[in-house]
Image (cartoon, rainbow, N blue to C red):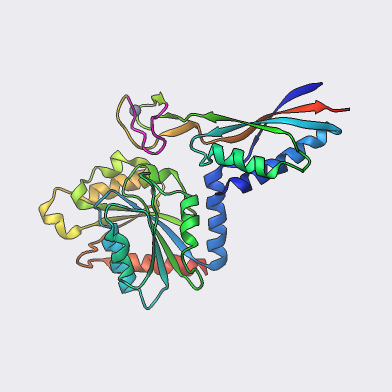
Amino acid sequence: MHEMSIVESILGILREEMVKYDGQKLKKVTLKNGRLAGVVTESLQFAWEALIPGGEFDGAELEIIEVPVKVACGECGEVFSPEHTRCMPCPKCEALLGHKVLEGKELLIDSIEVDDQQ
Amino acid sequence: MSKEVTIVRNVLEANDRLADELQKNFRVKKILCLNLMSSPGAGKTTLLERTLSDLRDEFKMAVIEGDLQTDNDAQRVAATGAQAVQINTEGGCHLDSGMVMDALKAIDTEGLDILFVENVGNLVCPAEFNVGEDYKVTLLSVAEGDDKPEKYPFMFHISAVMLLNKVDLLPYVDFDLKKAENHAKKLNKDIEVMPISARTGENLEQWYDWLRKKRAEKL
Ligand SMILES: [Zn+2]
């Protein structure tokens, strides 16, 4: 659905970053995809494979690491990884509300691998 | 020779980015968008039916319906003459911006004044996800107990309005209006508390005036 435009955003960032590696080739991108980010890993991979061939990053690989959700309970502070990403009862006090999301909302380009091709 | 470089760049906070896009769209089109949240059975659909009928001549309104409790919610809303689109949340307990964006494709937004997003009945998860709304409105029925703001603080913390519905039942239930209001105000001093009955129509003018005021502010 919106994964195509996400790949476009990724490409924009990569173009900026690659300026620093003039003359080198992008080999691999590692992306962290939080389960709450609302982005489907398979669709992203599909969009990547559809958009990359023939362009400046032809042949570059996309690795996606899925990051589980981690929250701190809004009532008692207990840190836990909920089973479901939509409803999150605290395992200690059963509170449902006000949890602080610590991890799992992010969609980050974590690292890139560049190759000296000369 | 190849080398790995850590860069750590945020691609986007997917939902927030989509919410921003929706908000921009609503600003340009001068649509007031409200995210309506409540527990199941608090009376969101009755309130909407009433609002859509009573203000029919004043505003062009539409509803995005995320509550799948009963199939006829959307039909009840559509019976008032307003556009209604139902979202299949596939068991999820809140709506997100992507879903609202998809649902909007089925709505004629030309000349639309107010868009209600009727969120899934649940006081927890919907509070975490923006859907591009101008305001969050929480509906609480007096049958549920006056300790709700205490139990679900976040929801009241981020809502602009707390509607206390079913006040016609006050003689039969143990609900202290003042206590609920005080609690809500402790969590959010700016929250507007309106005791209403969507069934009898009691005090709905206060709610309608709020809608008129907020809609006028968008122009
Ligand atoms: Zn807890």
Q: Is residue A75 left or right of residue A27?
A: left
Give residue B48's quadrant in the image.
bottom left
Image spot of residue B100 (x, y percent): 46, 55
The main secondary structure of the magenta stretch is loop
Q: Which span of residues is magenta-colored?
A: A81-91
| Quadrant containing the C terminus of chain A in the rendered view | top right
Give residue B64's quadrant in the image.
bottom left
**Of residues A80 and B212, the one drawn nearer to the viewer in this rendering:** A80
Image spot of residue A98 (x, y percent): 39, 37
Residue at x-position 16% and y-position 60%: B168
Query: As displayed, is residue A46 above or below residue B54?
Result: above
Image spot of residue B190 (x, y percent): 40, 52
Rendered-image quarter of ligand 1: top left
Q: Is residue B78 left or right of residue B171?
A: right
Residue at the far left: name it: B172
Residue at x-position 30% and y-position 27%: A93
**Of residues A43 and B115, the one drawn nearer to the viewer in this rendering:** A43
Q: Is residue A76 visible?
A: yes
